[in-house]
Amino acid sequence: MAGGKLSPRQKMINLMYLIFIAMLAMNMSKEVLQAFGMMDEKLTASNNAATVRNNAAYDDLALKAVEQSEKYGDEKAKADKIKTMSADFYNYIEGLKTEMKATVKDPTNYETMDKGKYLDDNFFKGDDGDYKEAGQEFLNQINGYKSGVSEVLGGKFENISKDVAERFSTDKVTDREGKERQWLDYNYKGFPLVASLTKLTQIQNDIKTTESEVLTAMLQGQMNSDVSMKNYTAILIPNTPATLQGENFQGKIVLGRYDGSLKPEKVIVNGREVTNIKDGGAVLDFPAGNVGENEIKGKFIFMENGKPVEIPIETSYNVVAKPNDAVISADKMNVVYRGVPNPITVSVPGVADNAVKATAPGLKKVKGIGKYLMSPGKGREVKITVSAKLPDGTPITSAKAFRIKDIPAPSAAVRGEYGMIKMPKSTLQKATISSVLPDFVFDLKINVSGFSVKVPGQPTVKVRGNKFDAAAIRVLQRARRGDVVVIFDIQQKLQGNTGYYLKNANPVNVEITN
């Protein structure tokens, strides 16, 4: 274009080409600067929203520490330190951004923020890795926050400490030419002002993310501790309330969960306050009362989210002078469930099993001393009547009513997980969709023959079977990171009792991670 002897006309055309190319470069530069500015605005809005969420989580943890200090007191102290360090570091970055914005007339006119003079003059002396006081202070702030968080967390939250170390790493970086450069030079030297502002806002976003992860881990960690096997104790359940001399003792040992650190605000039993609380339980010690069945009524009172929560106590015990009444116990609980055979133990103290007879609609005798199965039908209550003959030939009759309940609504599950879960699209599309009964007293099997999938912005897809088909996979591929895919409308049947109509399963929500 510039070589050889050219006519005046050709020279003019070449000059116009140069001007045109320069204009294109200028327009592209303005678009890039504008894009950085818009990204900074979005990050700032995200940080503001994260601040609100994190403050609510801090308040929640503080309230739990007041209500259950033995459980959450230590976590609260650590969270306070993280909060203080995060606020100090965040405010330092904000102050640095304020100084940078002060160098331009209009900090919202991103097209004018194309120079990197402020940081170049204040951070760098010139050579790679040779910094002024402000540049070294910036590095010290990042490294100090990283090490401070790790120190507070200790070895209890190693995964979070590892993520924080990577998130705030200032290690050397290899550029596109294969040259090893200092982190600060690589990220901030010679960059436009708006680009550096956006990077600083991203650091603030990383601070908010760190706080959120710490708070979530602390609250979730305590919940995991609550259900740990360490909190279980062995409980002996005899097959019969009493064993006669010369007979074999029969029964079973089960595990029951308790929490020694869980202390109620108050316990009321039969109108009186119980003050003797040991290993998470209220210790009872009072006169037994009259012969026969005696009720125990009252309530546990706990503080939850600043409000009292009452858990009723409704049970009974028998006082026996001599064998003159039947003791009936449900092996699972004080109710029976429709749709499943409920184990029932019936016995009369001091009376052999062959001298005891129990009758009720849906009740049948099975192998074992005092063992029955109850399959309730319609209605809300079933009464079991027991007749027996005492060793002296005296006949006795006793009856007890049991409440009848339906099987609770199942929950849709992916890989056995239910509620709100996270996983990659590649994992979800291969996973088996099931229906489970969380914490139900019976281990029931539910067969799934179909379900529906809803991806944000896409039509609902109905699937036959218990795995994603081709249509569902195609829709799933359109989901983006952070989208919540809802799996619902589970087609299900109870295994072994297909005539029983289960309640609609609760949906499972899957947040896509990548």
Image: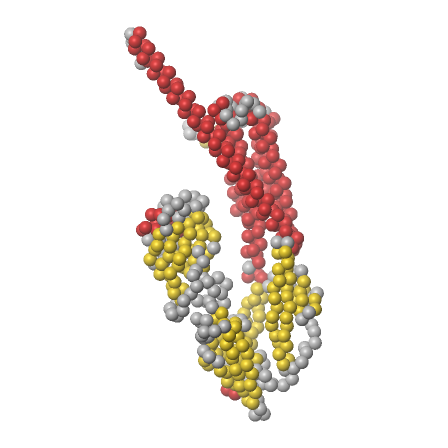
Is 19 in front, or is 426? Answer: 19
Residue depicted at x 62% and y 56%: 304
Is 110 in front, or is 127? Answer: 110
Q: Is residue 114 above or below residue 258?
A: above
Q: In this view, which residue lies farthest toward the front?
A: 379
In what quadrant of the picture does the C terminus appear?
Answer: top left
Q: On the picture, is 45 further left or further right than 492?
A: right
Is 300 in front, or is 422? Answer: 300
Q: Is residue 109 above or below residue 271?
A: above
Q: In this view, which residue lies farthest toward the bottom?
A: 393
- Tally the marks: 0
Image x and y of residue 195, in percent: 49, 28
Residue depicted at x 31% and y 51%: 470
In what quadrant of the picture does the N terminus appear?
Answer: top left
Q: On the picture, is 389 further left or further right than 477?
A: right
Image x and y of residue 126, in percent: 53, 21
Image x and y of residue 55, in percent: 59, 44
Q: Is residue 507 above or below residue 390?
A: above
